[in-house]
Image (cartoon, rainbow, N blue to C red):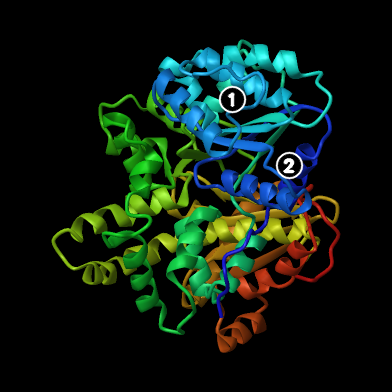
Amino acid sequence: MSRKWSFYGRSEELGALLEHLRSRKWFFGTIRGRRRIGKTALVQQALTTLAADEPGPARRLLVELPDSTPADLATVFGQALRMEGLDQTPGIRHPIVNLPEVAWALGALCASGITVLLDEFQVCHRGPLRGLPSLLKAEVDRLQNLSGPGGLILLGSVQSEMEALLSDRQAPLFGRRTFDISLGPWRLPTLFEVAEAHGAGAPDRILTLWTLFGGVPKYWRDYAALEKDDTGEAWISWAARLCQGLFLRTDSPLREEGTSLHGRELRRNHLAVLRAVARLGPCPHADLQTALPGLSLGPYLRTLTRDLRLIERLSPVFARTGHHRTRYVVSDPLLLAWLRVMQAARQAARIRSAASVAKSLVARLATLEGHAFERLVRDGVEARSRAGIGFRLTDRVRGYWNRPRTADASIELDLVAWNEEDRVVRFGSCKRNPAKHTQAACRKFREQVGRFLRSAGRRFASWTNQQVLFAPRFPVAQRAVLESRGWMCRDLADMRRGLVEANRRGSGPGRISAKVTGDD
């Protein structure tokens, strides 16, 4: 039975934010993270908590800055003041019609003990709004020694622009922050908790939602609004209905999300490279060059990886940065699903019924889940170690692949994880379909582990090595057979065991290494 949407995870970030909001000394902080990651939800939860603890008139103002002109920003700011009844705050000069007057009003609000939150602050890195950070610098410098409540918090969703505004030594606001909260995707224990609470606790449901959403809270909330309870239907019909409701209908909440993620300003060659990586990835530079002949890839890949962070560079374990075996992948799960599956399906839904298109895309979604499952397993191994459950890591989980001259020398390992202190190394083979863990596939996996231990992994040759088969769910009979042959088998039920409970106890982020409390 599903339940009403709640505030999930983020306990550490919420505690840190509340500590500053309750402070009796003026502060200047930032909350950063990609779109849809939950910055505003975190602020709203903090304000709700404070309102319950401190009855009385609101002493906080949240303004979403428009990507527009200075005059329009001043209008939006003035409207927010009036809406919250703060337009008569002492020191504010009316009318507010330009950036200097906005900055002065912000200073007056903060001096009066009010906390001001400016959302989408990255727009101040662009065109006509570039002058606002310099104007805010004067106010921040004037307020920094102020005793009493109040503060300024900047929220931003474009990481590269926020860094340019706040971390560049030449930026007006450089070195003035008293705190910085960076939000990433939900951790896997939170995802397990949310999935179970909202009718998607079955392993095949979890994998599908992970493939589509990763750990982005807004998308999970869209799912929860659509899917009230687990009806128990077969995965194929459930997945088709899910995609139809979220992406293909005219009122679907994620109908335009893929286009928004890569930005409407991304054109021509940048978009061509992004699409090629989505189609081919994980792929090496050589494959991209073959797919896009005549195009100098370097500048486009730098922009997409470093500035926009839409593409991620993956290197095999022990390979140096920039190694010729580097592979490129689209970093955002929903954007990858959009480019690989949903965009073409949405176009097809213009001339065919959404229901029929949804049925036809399920096979492509299943293929995409195969790649996503490897990422889920790696995250799960790290999450369990972080919580002090099972196999203890002393380094990040990675994969390994080579570029052999002959096929019989190839090595492709989905997972390589190790414990330096106990001298134990673990290798993993991940299959979305457990039936693909055949005797031939297992034999090939064992051979590739042997090649790795004789080449790049020679340092592990004398260590205890464990070879583990992973699947979303192992049938009882198959698991018994594989384990009788000496294989370790792990599925999502094994991965989940103990994680949600540890998360609810407030297990926060820390070093990867943790005490062993289990035998898996």
Along the line of sight, the residue nearer the viewer: 328 or 440: 328
> Is residue 440 visible to the viewer in this orientation of the structure?
no
Between the C-alphas of marks 2 and 1, the distance is 20 Å
Work out which residue is located at the far front of the displayed protein and give it.
Answer: 88
In the shown orientation, is residue 181 left or right of residue 219?
right
Residue 377, given in percent of the width and then of the height, sits at 60, 61
In the shown orientation, is residue 147 left or right of residue 334?
right
Residue 35 vs 249, above or below: the answer is above
Residue 396 vs 431, above or below: the answer is above
Dot 2: element: helix
Residue 54, given in percent of the width and then of the height, sits at 77, 48
The residue singled out by tag 1 in the image is: 163
Tell me whether the residue at label 2 lies in contact with that at label 1, contact meaning CB atoms closer than 8 angstroms: no
Q: Label 1 sits on what residue type?
A: Glu
> Is residue 295 visible to the viewer in this orientation of the structure?
yes
Residue at (71% x, 50% y) in the render: 51
The residue singled out by tag 2 in the image is: 17
Q: Quadrant of residue 169?
A: top right
In the shown orientation, is residue 326 left or right of residue 357?
right
Residue at (33% x, 44% y) in the render: 259
**Labels 2 and 1: the sequence-earlier one:** 2
Residue 515, given in percent of the width and then of the height, sits at 86, 59
Residue 119 vs 175, above or below: the answer is below
Q: Label 2 sits on what residue type?
A: Leu
